[in-house]
Image: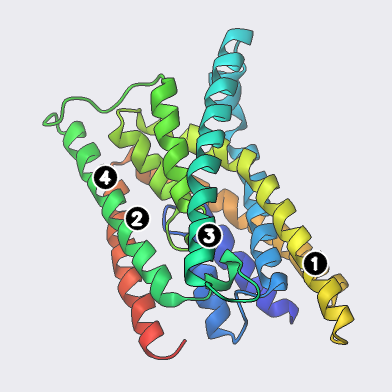
Amino acid sequence: MPIWKVLILAVVQGLAELLPVSSSAHVVVAEKLMGLDPTSPQMTLVLVMLHTGTMFAVIVYFWQRWAKAYFRSKAAFFDAAVRVVVATVLTALVGLPIQKIIEKTMFKGAEKAEIEQLFGRLDLIAGALFCVGILILIAGLARRKSMTGTFDSSGDDELSLGQASVIGAVQGLALPFRGFSRSGSTISAGMLAGVGRETAETFSFALAVVLTPAVLGREILRLLHAAHEAKAAGAPIDLHGAFTGSAIGLVLSFVAGLAALKWLSSWLESGKWWLFGVYCLAASGVVFWLFTRGY
């Protein structure tokens, strides 16, 4: 893949990843428009490496918040660790079975069934964008009411184990579906569960840091397996090019991700969260229109 295409994908990923608008949907659409196959092992690895770049952006941006919230004492660290572990386990318990059900139903009788084969389906992405748009809109309007005093509470600064469990379970719903924004759904779920805006944001991105290495490892193994099969079939995959392009994208998405995080926080603080829901609904319509055009 030409480097200029990697650059475009890195910028799209970096700007969209940490905003609640589904970076995956934006990257898949960009790949489609550039004639790339979002379902190929090379492209799914590129996407996950871009996620890794934004993960490092998350660590840099949130480090002071995490130090204040999670590392101020041994007790605070233990409580935070328990909540992160429980939420991550629930992510797996919800997301992995859904993934297996999709693979066994939508690929029934197929020689090879992988959830990644659906990542290029713009009709499914449009539906996921619509669903997360509704969720963000509901949470954003509830938050807006709380800021004008017509809603009971704007949320608590402390995160209970039950609230962490809700956020983790909703994150599991985001795993199998491109377009169902992970950050958008988890922060919205936290806000609706009564968690303070900043607390929901901080915890959501802490979960992202835990989840990303596991997803990256899966995609590396998937690419190596595909490369082995391709070599046996006489059509080897350029692993060096795939990893080089991904590494370049990682650096660029890190830079773009830092800028996106600052924008995200400012919009959350100004009570404009609901506008991200409006954007997702509009994006859903555009993506579905592209699907009807044969993309």
**Marks 3 and 4 in Cβ contact (< 8 Å):** no
Q: Residue 249 lies in what quarter of the image?
A: bottom right
Quadrant of the frame with the N terminus: bottom right
Q: Earlier in the sequence, mark 1 or mark 3?
A: 3
Badge 3: how crowded within 10 Å, few (<14), some, or many (20+)?
A: many
Counting from the top left corner in percent of width and height, residue 75 is at 58, 8
Question: In the image, what residue type sits under mark 3?
Answer: Leu
Compute the Cα span from label 3 to label 2. Answer: 18 Å
Instruction: Work out whether residue 100 or residue 284 is closer to the camera in this orientation and state it.
Output: 100
- Give the residue number, with chain letter if any, for mark 1: 225
- Give the residue number, with chain letter if any, for mark 3: 15
Residue beneath the point at 39% across and 47% down: 185
Instruction: Work out whether residue 112 or residue 15 is closer to the camera in this orientation and state it.
Output: 112
Question: Can residue 236 be seen from the camera position used here?
Answer: no
Badge 2: how crowded within 10 Å, few (<14), some, or many (20+)?
A: many
Q: Earlier in the sequence, mark 2 or mark 1?
A: 2
- Give the residue number, with chain letter if any, for mark 4: 140
**Marks 1 and 3 in Cβ contact (< 8 Å):** no
Compute the Cα span from label 2 to label 1. Answer: 33 Å
- Give the residue number, with chain letter if any, for mark 2: 132
Counting from the top left corner in percent of width and height, residue 3 is at 74, 77
Question: Can residue 111 be seen from the camera position used here?
Answer: yes
Q: Secondary structure at mark 2?
A: helix
Q: Earlier in the sequence, mark 3 or mark 4?
A: 3
- The residue mark sitting in front, 2 or 1, is 1
Question: In the image, what residue type sits under mark 4?
Answer: Gly
Badge 4: how crowded within 10 Å, few (<14), some, or many (20+)?
A: many
- The residue mark sitting in front, 1 or 3, is 1
Question: In the image, what residue type sits under mark 1?
Answer: His
Compute the Cα span from label 4 to label 1. Answer: 43 Å
